[in-house]
């Protein structure tokens, strides 16, 4: 199952427009609040020029890119954590995602209604972040009494004491108006926090939805968002949702021509997908052969057996070794045979940490 990102924001900031462009699907996008009720889900190939080059050289029968899942979640309004708007059902949808893409409106257009009556990106950010924080605070407070009783009983276990310390640390940061991910937790406490499914524990990326004039250098609105993101240690990607929606409908040749005319090297959505990939701490490795070239997603820092397990659990269970070389060596030397002759094809064991862009062939026995 691909890792997924939930697209959140106030109503009418361009979430569904961006989602439609990402997935080339037909999620509803209209000029009124709560146009999206049930979350729309789309699985998107991760664009990777390295895979394109491998395919050109190997000429396989089949090509399988790695993917990410995007979830378009209905607009959140002030008071959502208390049931305002369409309420907590949307917050529950966010809990199921791995990361948050927070879309912020950074353009003025009198024809597009703003739910708060005017464009103010910091105000918008504060509303969303506050509602997510309040929802988490409610979750943690409900666990506090139970955790205290368990930790203070005569039969208190180490696990019960760890749960209480986790709850106390989370309450401290949430009451200070900070997201749960800023809490200083021990490894054992992180496991407890994971089971709470807190929304503000998830990594967050800001998506500044701009008009065409704001793509290259931004505008006064994006500067405010970038300043806030820098304070939080987050990243910002500028996207013109209207333009991306138009690009998504073009044929490949027309798309290239459109981008060149606009002075762009690639669609903004490619940058968004790559930023989301980085946000989740992901890298790509490849398996390559005449039958198939395929990209695989793993967490940065994964060792060879774990990477093999992404293909099949038997590969991890019976792992023997991995023949490995870097895709850049393939590009530089022109063929796998040339890589072998240069002594750059290696046999790696169980402790090898897979690198981004590795081409791997696993040997296993079960």
Image: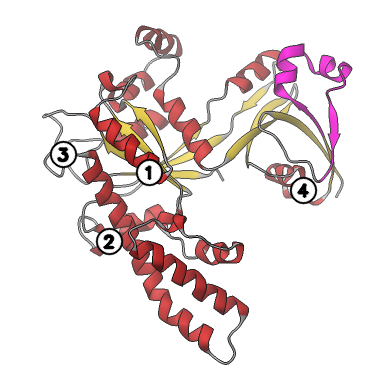
Give me the disc on residue 240.
none
Q: Residues within 10 Å of mark 4 (few under 14, many from 20)?
A: many
Identify which residue is drawn at 41% across, 27% down: 269
224, above or below 338, in the image = below
Q: CA distance from mark 3 to mark 2?
A: 20 Å
Q: CA distance from mark 4 to mark 1?
A: 41 Å
Q: Residue at x 72, y 45 (%)?
A: 312
Circle 3 crowding by C-alpha within 10 Å: few under 14, some 14–19, many from 20: many
- Residue at 76 percent across and 32 percent down: it is 360
User: Marks 4/3: CA distance?
Assistant: 51 Å
Q: Is residue 68 left or right of residue 139?
A: right
Instruction: Name the N-terminal-most of marks 2 and 1.
Output: 2
Numbered circle sitting on residue 316: 4
**Looking at the image, is mark 2 or mark 1 nearer the viewer?**
1
Instruction: Give the residue pinned by disc 2.
Output: 81
- Report if the CB atoms under discs 3 and 2 are less than 8 Å apart: no
Q: Percent position (x, y) of residue 144?
A: 42, 77
Q: Which mark is residue 231?
A: 1
- Could you say where residue 249 lies in the image, as x and y percent from the top left? 36, 20
258 and 25: which one is in front? Answer: 258
For mark 3, give the secondary structure.
Answer: loop
Residue depicted at x 40% and y 69%: 140
SS at circle 1: helix
Mark nearer the viewer, 4 or 3: 3
Point out the tag, 4 or 3, that comes first from the N-terminus: 3
| Residue 338 is covered by the magenta coloring | yes
Q: Which dot, 4 or 1, sits closer to the camera?
A: 1
The residue carrying mark 3 is: 114
Judge whether 58 appears above or below 17 on screen. above
Q: Which region of the structure is painted magenta? A: 323-350
SS label for mark 4: helix
- Could you tell me if the residues under marks 4 and 3 are in contact, i.e. CB atoms within 8 Å? no
């Amino acid at each position: 199952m691909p890792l997924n990102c939930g697209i959140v924001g106030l109503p009418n900031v361009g979430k569904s427009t961006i989602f439609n462009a990402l997935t080339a699907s037909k999620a509803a996008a209209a000029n009124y609040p709560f146009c999206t009720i049930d979350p729309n889900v789309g699985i998107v190939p991760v664009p990777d020029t390295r895979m394109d080059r491998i395919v050109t050289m190997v000429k396989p029968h089949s090509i399988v890119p790695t993917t990410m899942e995007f979830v378009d979640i209905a607009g959140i309004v002030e008071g959502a954590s208390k049931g305002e708007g369409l309420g907590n059902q949307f917050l529950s949808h966010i809990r199921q995602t791995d990361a948050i893409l927070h879309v912020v409106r950074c353009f003025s257009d009198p024809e597009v209604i703003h739910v708060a009556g005017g464009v103010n990106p910091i105000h918008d950010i504060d509303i969303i972040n506050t509602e997510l924080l309040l929802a988490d605070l409610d979750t943690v407070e409900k666990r506090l009494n139970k955790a205290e009783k368990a930790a203070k009983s005569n039969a208190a276990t180490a696990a019960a004491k760890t749960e209480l310390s986790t709850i106390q640390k989370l309450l401290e940061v949430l009451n200070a108006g900070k997201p749960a991910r800023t809490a200083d937790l021990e490894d054992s406490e992180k496991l407890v926090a994971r089971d709470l499914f807190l929304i503000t524990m998830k990594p967050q990326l800001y998506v500044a939805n701009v008009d065409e004039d704001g793509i290259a250098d931004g505008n006064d609105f994006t500067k405010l968002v970038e300043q806030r993101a820098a304070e939080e240690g987050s990243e910002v990607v500028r996207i013109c949702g209207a333009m991306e929606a138009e690009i998504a409908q073009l044929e490949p040749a027309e798309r290239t021509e459109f981008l060149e005319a606009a002075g762009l090297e690639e669609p903004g959505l490619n940058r968004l997908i790559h930023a989301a990939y980085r946000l989740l701490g992901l890298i790509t490795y490849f398996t390559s052969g005449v039958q198939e070239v395929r990209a695989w997603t793993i967490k940065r820092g994964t060792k060879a057996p774990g990477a093999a397990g992404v293909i099949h659990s038997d590969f991890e269970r019976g792992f023997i070794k991995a023949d490995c070389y870097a895709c850049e060596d393939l590009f530089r030397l022109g063929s796998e045979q040339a890589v072998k002759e240069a002594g750059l094809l290696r046999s790696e064991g169980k402790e090898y940490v897979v690198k981004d862009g590795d081409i791997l062939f696993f040997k296993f026995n079960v």
